[in-house]
Amino acid sequence: MNQRTPTLLYIDDDDALARLVSRGLTRRGYRVVHAASGEEGLDHIRRAETQGGIDVVALDQYMPGLDGLETLEQIMAIPGAPPVVFVTASQDSSIAVTALKAGAADYLVKDVKGDFIPLLHVAAEGALRQAELQKAREEAEAEIHASRDRYAALAAERELLLREVNHRVGNSLQIIASLLHLQASSAGQEEVKAALTNAMGRVAAVAQVHRRLYTSQDLKSVVLNQYLDSLLEDLRRSAEGNRMSRLTLKAEPIEIDPDRAVAVGIIVNELVMNAVKYAYPDGAGPIHVELTSQGEDLQLTITDNGVGDNVKADPRSTGMGQRIVAAMASKLDASVERDPAHSGTRIVLRFQRTPPAPGKASTAAAS
């Protein structure tokens, strides 16, 4: 495929000099179009699309009507205008500065004999290369912006899908929890009722995380104080009578990843339900949940003022709650300790805000 011949528009009211420029640049591989005034040159540029296009302009300074600087200003206002080499017979350097500031790609001094034509050829070639580089840079920047827009659109779509998934999962788990609650309410045997109620609490703890993620601005974290507040409210609504009436929460607004939030929620559910069942054999009593930060570590305590170590062993107990707490503590790499100085029962969990580095041994232990 043959390379297209570049077209130079020479704007100058000197016809004889224009013929010299035309002959000189034609020999150097250019097609030359002559305009005898600034107005005619502007008309050529505006009609360039129907005439094969103007690639570069050589513009004389002194002309009747619009002079070179006035013409240059109007050329620069045309969208997609070709680069301009400003040509003048004046030796005044201030003219060069003004032309370059106005948008000219280059500047040179002409003579009446045409000795400047080789310099004009070099300037035109440089202006064309500069225009090609500018076009390539603009196309690259446009592609970068387009790529960013596509990435932003994909990220927004992914976030929307994740929210929808969390919404659906949360709703499905909540339906399961409600079914377990109904089944527990209709169960005739107390051990069956207790097992179904415990299962309902565990499912609700997971469902609450997904509901939090659906309404959160950040899909990568859960604010624990809000999550625990909703979780305990679920427990209050599901409890029979007033056994949860004195359940309280004090928690700092700490953010952790959703998986760790699930583990925290399940632990709280198990220990609170354990306190409800065993701490106060003769009725309800205070149960307090507290979450505090200690640097990079978090401390979670569940406290009651009940019978403590004097609690009677329930022969129907399977130890499932203790195993679940131990498993979730292992997931958090948390230590689990019973406070021996507390008259009732005070369970203390300590774990890191962020997951420990891979390969670190678990410190979880259940009391």
Image: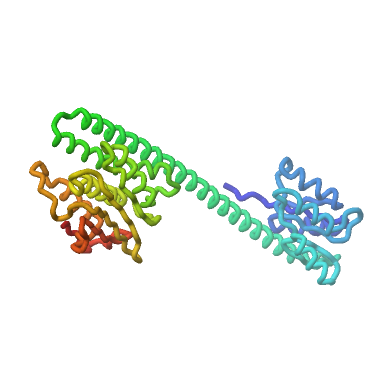
How far across and down, in percent of the image, does residue 313 sit?
Answer: 10, 48
How far across and down, in percent of the image, does residue 250 sit?
Answer: 36, 54
Position of 170 relative to 39 (above/below): above
How far across and down, in percent of the image, does residue 266 sit?
Answer: 25, 47
> Which residue is found at the position 54% from the left and 48% from the top?
146
Residue with the most extreme left position: 315
Classify residue 99 by image quadrant: bottom right
Left or right, 112 with reference to 338: right
Classify residue 297 by image quadrant: bottom left
| Residue 221 seen by the camera | no
Residue with the most extreme right position: 64
Position of 349 relative to 287 (above/below): below
> Which residue is found at the position 36% from the left and 44% from the top?
230
Residue with the most extreme front position: 282
Classify residue 118 by image quadrant: bottom right
Q: How is the image coloured?
A: rainbow
| Residue 184 seen by the camera | yes
> Which residue is found at the position 70% from the left and 52% from the top?
55
Q: Nearer the viewer, residue 146 or 124?
A: 146
Q: Nearer the viewer, residue 311 or 43?
A: 311
Position of 76 relative to 245 (above/below): below
Mark count: 0
Q: Nearer the viewer, residue 214 or 277?
A: 277
How far across and down, in percent of the image, does residue 345 sit?
Answer: 21, 55
Tell me the quadrant of the picture where the C terminus can be found: bottom left
Left or right, 35 with reference to 264: right
